[in-house]
Image: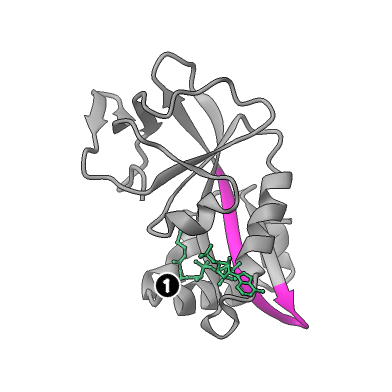
Amino acid sequence: MLTSEELVAAGLREAVVEVCVAAHELEEFRLLFTYVPSGARHFLAFDGGTLVSHAVVTTRGVQPQGLPILRTAFVDAVATLPSHQNGGYASATMRRLAEEIGDFEIGCLQTDREAFYEHLGWEPWRGPLGGRSDDGIIPTPDQRGVMVLRLPTTPPVDLDAMLTIECQPGRIWE
Ligand SMILES: CC(C)(COP(=O)(O)OP(=O)(O)OC[C@H]1O[C@@H](n2cnc3c(N)ncnc32)[C@H](O)[C@@H]1OP(=O)(O)O)[C@@H](O)C(=O)NCCC(=O)NCCS
């Protein structure tokens, strides 16, 4: 695991961007580091000296209805180089990530590959979803693929309750 600062100092920033762009076929990932706050935790897998898989954790705050806002490890930019997919790299990266977010109260991510994460212990959120803004809750009824990972300090959560997350500039869940 490397923080964003350590990753940049290690000269790995471009390699991370290239893995994300190639895996997602999305040039927008060239801006990844303009969105990743300092202190974010990057999880990496290598084949020899080549970076082949990546995931990043930033701190957000999901709130299941009836519970306080939980210190949330939000996972983004999960990606494996196309040439190395289906070789277990992302599974290994995500297992390592799960071991190293024990200081958070819950894990959360949004994906269109739910089955992949379910094999790793993540659970789809079934209840209604929304964003918390200064003006109240913004419902996100069309949102799909929000999943959570229970951690040692996660309180009992009802997956059918409403789940909200703080709105970020230009972003709620995705
Ligand atoms: C989704 C993604 C990150 C998975 O990365 P990966 O390194 O291929 O993942 P793994 O190899 O660990 O697992 C992929 C599949 O191969 C299987 N697998 C893992 N190791 C294997 C092995 N040694 N032999 C055969 N199959 C294996 C896994 O069980 C998994 O199957 P599942 O999807 O049915 O659960 C990758 O496909 C990717 O970058 N996709 C494009 C971007 C994307 O969709 N990102 C995720 C969005 S949140």
At horizontal 67% and vertical 66% (from top left) the residue drawn is 8
Amino acid under label 1?
Answer: His
Secondary structure mostly seen in the magenta stretch = strand
At horizontal 37% and vertical 49% (from top left) the residue drawn is 145
Quadrant position of ligand 1 = bottom right
- Per the rendered image, the range of residues in magenta is 46-58
Secondary element under disc 1, as helix, strand or loop, is helix
* Residue 102 visible in the shown view: yes
- Can you name the residue that lies furthest to the bottom here? 83
Please say whether residue 97 is one of the residues in the magenta stretch: no
Measured as percent of width and height from the top left, residue 73 is found at: 57, 40
Residue at the spot of label 1 = 24
Number of numbered callouts drawn: 1
Measured as percent of width and height from the top left, residue 34 is found at: 47, 59
Closer to us: 100 or 92 = 92
* Residue 4 visible in the shown view: no
Distance from mark 1 CB to nearest ligand 1 atom below 8 Å? yes
Measured as percent of width and height from the top left, residue 100 is found at: 73, 45
Q: Above or below — where is 78 with respect to 152?
A: below
Measured as percent of width and height from the top left, residue 99 is found at: 73, 45
At horizontal 58% and vertical 59% (from top left) the residue drawn is 55
Closer to us: 56 or 99 = 99
Q: Above or below — where is 90 with respect to 83?
A: above
